[in-house]
Amino acid sequence: MESPQPVDLRNQRALSDWLPGRLAAEEPEILVVGDVMLDGWWSGSIERLCREAPAPVVDLQSRESAPGGAANTAMNLAALGARVAVAGIIGTDDAGTDLRRQLQAAGIDVRHLYAHPDMVTTTKIRISSGGQVMLRLDDSARTIPAAALGALAGAVRAAVVRKAAVLVCDYGTGVLAEPVRNTLVQALEGDGRPLVVVDAHDPRPWAVLQPDLVTPNAQETARLLDQRLPDGPARADAVGAEADALLAATGARAVVATLDRDGTVLLTPGGAAHRTWARPAAEKQASGAGDTFVAALTLARSVGLPLTASLDLAQAAADVVVHQPGTSVCSTAQLSRYLEAFADTALDADELERQLEAHRAQGQRIVLTNGCFDVLHSGHTRYLNQAKQLGDILVVALNSDDSVRRLKGPDRPINAVAERAAVVAALSCVDYVTVFDTPTAGPLIRQLRPEVYAKGGDYTPEMLAETPDVEEHGGRVVILDYVAERSTTAVVNRIRAGEGAAQVN
């Protein structure tokens, strides 16, 4: 589906199936600097043990290779429409030749990929059988030749010119040692600096760069805080409470802590600003979802998409990849199809009731909220993120088109219910969407019996007609933050008046 008219990406809050194509059309120039690798995926059958030791014999049936590490990040950026250059160090060995060939085939600029005869191209070979990884073989250089570091430093200085973003991928192999890091810091000084994103095993040495974003995973976040993080949902809360410490340690304007199955947490000087929730797949031979996430995040931010929307888009891209085996990438077409699939996700009340009973059987708490959600804005996304954190499963009930007209007038809704459902369902914090046509959500509440009914705005529980229906089955009403001057009506009025995006945060 194409966007019906040009869109100011700075004011785009919702994920629609046309958005990945719109981002790709911008073709931002992005430089990836870091530890490029070659991933190997060797698979075969196991039918016997070897004679020398009680170890299985794998009869290899296929050998595949794919760019890994920073090279996988570059591949994802290219697949999402960016014009990508990669800077790193490889050997003159077969692995280096294979890696360069695959990057070139993807349209990536490899002029700054320096090959040195004394260098070993980093490889990670996974050996599997029956869908299970049995062993991983890692090969890398123990030391990086000084001449190679000098050549990369010189390449980086020239490569950053006229880039929309610079993405640093530091996996700790020594390729991004002081000569390269110091040159990069100097090259990025002054006005007109591009977006700078750091994805590093240890972001602390990069604090001098004052990056716009850093993306530590759960283990890296724990090391930065020098503490053990709790498992499960409490982990996100624990990370959110340490926003100031993480920002200080990394020198970043914002930190995005990626927490695997628990999604991500955006940390800014004001604390935890946004959450995403992962839609994990069953365990598979998958690798590189973090590379996909940071690539999509960097692409979206480099063309001006708001940070919270960029996070939701990056989470969607990562969700695509975790359902694919091996070291995979998410393309513009795949991401569009993934978002398009939410268009038909609104369930009727009876089917939704059956789904929720299955969740209750697993001890999960149901949160229900409702509204028109016509033109999605930052107030909506903040409110829905808060609602999600009140329980385990978030259900959003949308007013039907006729219901919206009765509430808002004959010129509303702006978007039909199918479009509204698709946009809301695509948010990672939303688990289910349904539609109701009654004057209040009371009948739906009596059928679904949520443990929590969340409502945003300047209400009290006593003001809500639905409160007796909630309390009848032991539920509770929670009033969430009221976001002044950010109502849909205010947004629509600004659009109709031709006012600029700067007034819509």
Image (cartoon, helix red, strand yellow):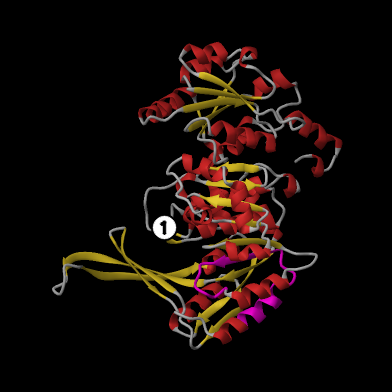
Q: Nearer the viewer, residue 106 or 248?
A: 248
The amino acid on which the numbered mark 1 sits, given as a three-letter code, is Ala
Q: Residues within 10 Å of mark 1 (few under 14, many from 20)?
A: some
The segment highlighted magenta reads 151-176
The residue furthest left is 51
Q: Position of residue 89 (x, y in %)?
A: 54, 79
> Is 106 on the left or on the right of 447, as rendered?
right
Q: Position of residue 9 (x, y in %)?
A: 72, 49
> Which residue: 47% across, 55% down?
219
The answer to whether residue 386 is magenta is no
Quarter in which the C terminus is drawn: top right
Q: Quadrant of residue 293?
A: bottom right
The residue furthest bottom is 117
> Is 40 on the left or on the right of 278, as rendered?
left
Examine the rendered structure and indicate whether residue 109 appears above or below residue 268.
Answer: below
Q: Is residue 110 visible?
A: no
Name the residue tied to disc 1: 286
Q: Nearer the viewer, residue 86 or 332?
A: 86
> Is 287 on the left or on the right of 412, as rendered?
left
> Is 392 on the left or on the right of 254, as rendered?
left
